[in-house]
C-alpha cells in the first residue's frame, strides 16, 4: 500500500519543478552567419580533369571557439561572450565553407569534400582558426588562421599565418557579426591568393 501511494505521489512532486527546468540557453532572435564577398556563378560546371582540385578541411579551433558564441577578449587574459550573439553553426564550419567558396571563385579550382578527395586528392588545405572574435581593448574583430597547404602530390607542407582586423563601433550582435564577416572575407581572399600561386 505504501508503494502504491508513493507511485501516485511522484507526479505531484515533479509538477513544481517543471517551471524551473530549462534545457539550454534562450535562443537569440536571429543567428549570425558568414557570407562570401565573391559569389560562385550559378549553373557553371567544373570538372576535375580540367580544373585543379583542392580539399579544404574544417580547421581545428581552441576551446573558446568550439561553441557557437562569439568571444570577447579584454585585458589580455579575460574572455567573455557577446550577449545575444550566436552563430548558426560552429565558426570552424562557417569559415571552412567561406574559404572553399572564395578559393573556387577566385582561382577556378574545384573544391572537393573530404570524401570526394579520395578519388582525386589534388591540393590539401588544413589549419587552425586561432582567433575569431572581438578584441575589446582595440575595438576590433580579429580573425587569425594558421594554414598548412600541401600542393598536389608533393609531400612538402607550406605553412603561413593570415590575419585580418575590422573595426567594431559597439560590442553588440549585429555590429560584431558584420565586422567578423568582413575580417573573415579578408583572410579568405588572402588564402585564395596564396593557394592560387
Image (tube, rainbow, N blue to C red):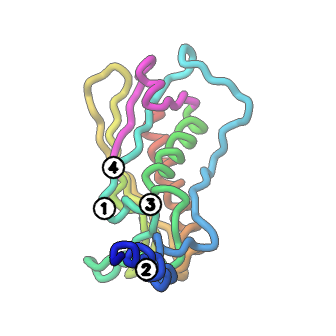
Q: Nearer the viewer, mark 3 or mark 2?
A: 2
Going from N to C along the chain, the mark reached first, 4 or 2, is 2
Going from N to C along the chain, the mark reached first, 2 or 1, is 2
User: Gap in Å between the C-alphas at discs 2 and 1?
Assistant: 44 Å
Residue visible at 36% across and 27% down in the picture: 151
The circle on residue 60 is 4
Mark 3 packing: few (<14 Cα in 10 Å), some, or many (20+)? many
Q: Nearer the viewer, residue 42 or 91?
A: 91
User: Gap in Å between the C-alphas at discs 3 and 2?
Assistant: 61 Å
Label 2 sits on a secondary structure element that is helix
Identify the image quadrant of residue 106.
top right
Q: Nearer the viewer, mark 2 or mark 1?
A: 2
Q: Which residue is mark 1?
A: 63
Q: Which residues are magenta?
A: 108-128
User: Gap in Å between the C-alphas at discs 4 and 1?
Assistant: 10 Å
Q: Is residue 194 magenta?
A: no
Q: Which residue is mark 3?
A: 164
Residue 76 position in % (x across, y down): 27, 78
Amino acid at each position: 500500500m505504501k508503494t502504491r501511494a508513493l507511485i501516485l505521489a511522484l507526479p505531484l512532486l515533479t509538477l513544481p519543478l517543471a517551471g524551473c527546468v530549462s534545457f539550454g540557453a534562450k535562443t537569440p532572435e536571429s543567428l549570425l552567419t558568414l557570407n562570401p564577398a565573391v559569389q560562385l556563378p550559378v549553373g557553371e560546371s567544373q570538372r576535375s580533369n580540367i580544373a585543379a582540385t583542392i580539399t579544404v578541411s574544417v580547421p581545428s579551433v581552441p576551446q573558446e571557439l568550439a561553441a557557437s558564441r562569439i568571444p570577447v577578449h579584454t585585458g589580455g587574459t579575460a574572455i567573455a561572450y557577446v550577449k545575444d550573439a550566436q552563430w548558426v553553426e560552429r565558426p570552424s564550419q562557417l569559415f571552412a565553407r567561406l574559404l572553399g567558396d572564395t578559393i573556387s571563385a577566385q582561382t577556378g579550382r574545384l573544391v572537393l569534400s573530404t570524401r570526394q578527395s579520395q578519388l582525386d586528392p589534388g591540393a590539401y588545405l588544413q589549419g587552425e582558426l586561432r582567433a575569431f572574435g572581438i578584441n575589446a581593448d582595440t575595438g576590433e574583430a580579429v580573425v587569425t588562421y594558421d594554414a598548412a597547404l600541401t600542393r598536389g602530390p608533393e609531400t612538402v607542407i607550406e605553412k603561413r599565418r593570415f590575419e585580418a582586423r575590422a573595426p567594431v563601433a559597439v560590442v553588440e550582435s549585429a555590429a560584431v557579426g558584420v565586422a567578423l564577416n568582413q575580417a573573415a572575407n579578408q583572410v579568405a581572399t588572402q588564402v585564395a591568393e596564396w593557394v592560387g600561386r
